[in-house]
């Protein structure tokens, strides 16, 4: 095929006519700059968070380089320990990718990575320690500390914050696995096992389908038959009515403790 029938992606890289997808941009980057490391949303979309669709590929590489539509070059050192090979592509590992996403996506980047099991909280702290002095690190440190209960969504993060603010004496567990009567396993967002009491954080994104609605109600009644008590808070209520949430949590916990004949907080 003649060169004029090809489309240029980078100064020395050409491709057949057609859509210029993120994987195509990534392959072109690796061919042109083998030592480059793909970063940020691009790294996430190519590996553990495929629902992202960045219009521009970002990569750290040596040399400033000329601007190219669809590509953005970063000038920063990336520790070798935080680089992974993913099907021939050099990417920041999941932990550093999450830290890169925090300025844009806040705690949601952490929540998504933990829920998808892309990395652990310990991995995130290690990546943080290996990249000191970055702008925005104070925000990253605060969010990592706030993620100690490993929320899987912003709504769960809010729920954890509200319960901790109540300063109640009962030990809790997040993403607590229990068995249904038919042997299926299910995770409770927030459980106080000694009280057989659980709180759920309902965000429309995860609970807005008919199937999810039916499953939640079936699960709740199954657990109620096992003497669990389940209470649901909407994501909006958790986000906007913090004082009311905490008053209700305290009241619910006290009523449950009284019902079970346990010491009242």
Image: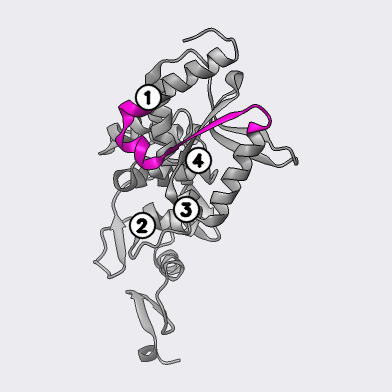
Between the residue at mark 1 and the residue at mark 4, the CA separation in whole angstroms equals: 25 Å
Q: Is residue 251 above or below residue 175?
A: above
Q: Residue at x 42, y 19 (%)?
A: 250
Q: Is residue 255 above or below residue 130?
A: above
**Across the whole image, how many numbered discs are drawn on residues?**
4
**Whether residue 180 is visible:** yes
**Residue 225 part of the magenta-drawn span:** yes
Element at label 4: helix
**Whether residue 80 is visible:** no
Between the residue at mark 2 and the residue at mark 3, the CA separation in whole angstroms equals: 36 Å
Label whose residue precedes the other's in the sequence (1 or 4):
4
Q: Residue at x 37, y 52 (%)?
A: 40
Left or right: 197, with 42 as reference point? right
Do tag 1 and tag 2 residues touch (Cβ < 8 Å)? Answer: no
Report the front residue among 240 and 229.
Answer: 229
Q: Which residues are magenta?
A: 224-247
Element at label 3: loop
Between the residue at mark 4 and the residue at mark 3, the CA separation in whole angstroms equals: 21 Å
Q: Which mark is residue 246?
A: 1
Report the front residue among 153 and 55.
Answer: 153
Q: Which mark is residue 208?
A: 3
Do tag 3 and tag 1 residues touch (Cβ < 8 Å)? Answer: no
The residue tagged 4 is 114
């Amino acid at each position: 095929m003649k060169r004029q029938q090809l489309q240029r992606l980078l100064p020395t890289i050409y491709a057949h006519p057609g859509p210029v997808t993120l994987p195509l941009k990534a392959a072109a980057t690796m061919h042109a700059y083998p030592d480059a490391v793909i970063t940020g949303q691009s790294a996430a979309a190519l590996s553990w968070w495929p629902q992202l669709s960045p219009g521009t590929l970002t990569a750290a590489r040596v040399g400033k380089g000329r601007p190219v539509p669809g590509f953005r070059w970063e000038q920063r050192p990336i520790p070798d320990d935080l680089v992974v090979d993913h099907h021939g592509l050099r990417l920041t590992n999941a932990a550093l990718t999450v830290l890169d996403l925090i300025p844009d996506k806040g705690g949601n980047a952490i929540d998504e990575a933990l829920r998808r099991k892309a990395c652990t909280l310990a991995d995130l702290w290690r990546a943080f320690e290996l990249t000191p002095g970055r702008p925005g690190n104070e925000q990253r440190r605060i969010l990592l500390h706030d993620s100690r209960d490993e929320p899987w969504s912003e709504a769960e993060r809010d729920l954890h914050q509200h319960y901790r603010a109540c300063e109640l004496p009962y030990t809790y567990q997040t993403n607590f696995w229990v068995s249904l009567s038919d042997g299926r396993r299910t995770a409770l967002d927030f459980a106080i096992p000694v009280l057989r009491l659980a709180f759920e954080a309902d965000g429309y994104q995860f609970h807005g389908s008919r199937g999810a609605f039916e499953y939640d109600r079936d699960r709740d009644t199954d657990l109620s038959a096992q003497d669990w008590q389940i209470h649901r808070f909407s994501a909006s209520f958790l986000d906007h009515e913090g004082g009311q949430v905490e008053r209700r949590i305290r009241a619910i916990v006290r009523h449950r403790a009284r019902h079970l004949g346990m010491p009242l907080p």
